[in-house]
Amino acid sequence: MFKIGDLVKVKEGTSDARMPDSRLGLILSYAKWPGYDFSHPDVFLVLFTNGACLRFHEMWLESVNGHPGS
C-alpha cells in the first residue's frame, strides 16, 4: 500500500502529455471526488518533477523509495 510522501514512478502502459519523461513523482494525497470510498484508497494525486499534479490508480505506480506498493 502506498502512502502520502512516497516517491513513485509511473509504469509504462499509461501516459499523459503533462507527465515528465522521468515519470517520477511524489504522492501528495489520496485523490478525492464525490462518492469516493476512503476505506481503501487506491487512487493518488502525484506531484511530478515538472510541477504537474495528476491522478493515478495504484496499479500504475511503483515505489522508488523501497516501500512495497501494490
Image (spheres, helix red, strand yellow):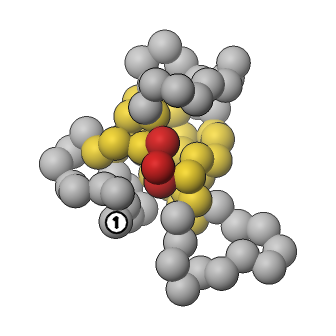
Q: Nearer the viewer, residue 49 or 34?
A: 34
The total number of labels drawn is: 1
Above or below, comparing residue 36 to residue 4 in the picture: below
Amino acid type, label 1: Met
Q: Nearer the viewer, residue 69 or 65?
A: 69
Quadrant where the C terminus sits is bottom left
Image quadrant holding the N terminus, namely: bottom left
Direction left: furthest residue: 66
Q: Residue at x 64, y 61 (%)?
A: 31
Residue nearer the viewer, 4 or 62: 62
Residue 9 picture location, percent across and down? 38, 34
Give the residue displayed 69% in from the left and 18% down from the top. Answer: 17
- Residue 6 vs residue 51, the one in the foreground: 6
Q: Residue at x 47, y 49 (%)?
A: 59
Q: Residue at x 34, y 42 (%)?
A: 62
Quarter of the image for residue 36 reads bottom right
In the image, farthest residue toward the bottom? 39
Label 1 environment density (alpha carbons within 10 Å; few <14, some 14–19, many ≥20)? few
Specify whether residue 50 is in view. no
Q: Residue furthest top?
A: 21
17 relative to 42, above or below: above
Residue 32 visible? The answer is yes
**Disc 1 secondary structure class:** loop
Tell which residue pokes out farthest to the right in this image.
34
The quadrant in which residue 64 appears is top left
Is 48 on the left-hand or right-hand side of 17? left
- Pointer 1 residue: 1
Q: Is residue 57 placed above or below 17 in the rendered structure?
A: below
Tell me residue 25's x, y (percent): 44, 36
Q: Is residue 22 left or right of residue 50?
A: left
User: Residue 7 in the image: x percent, y percent?
Assistant: 33, 44
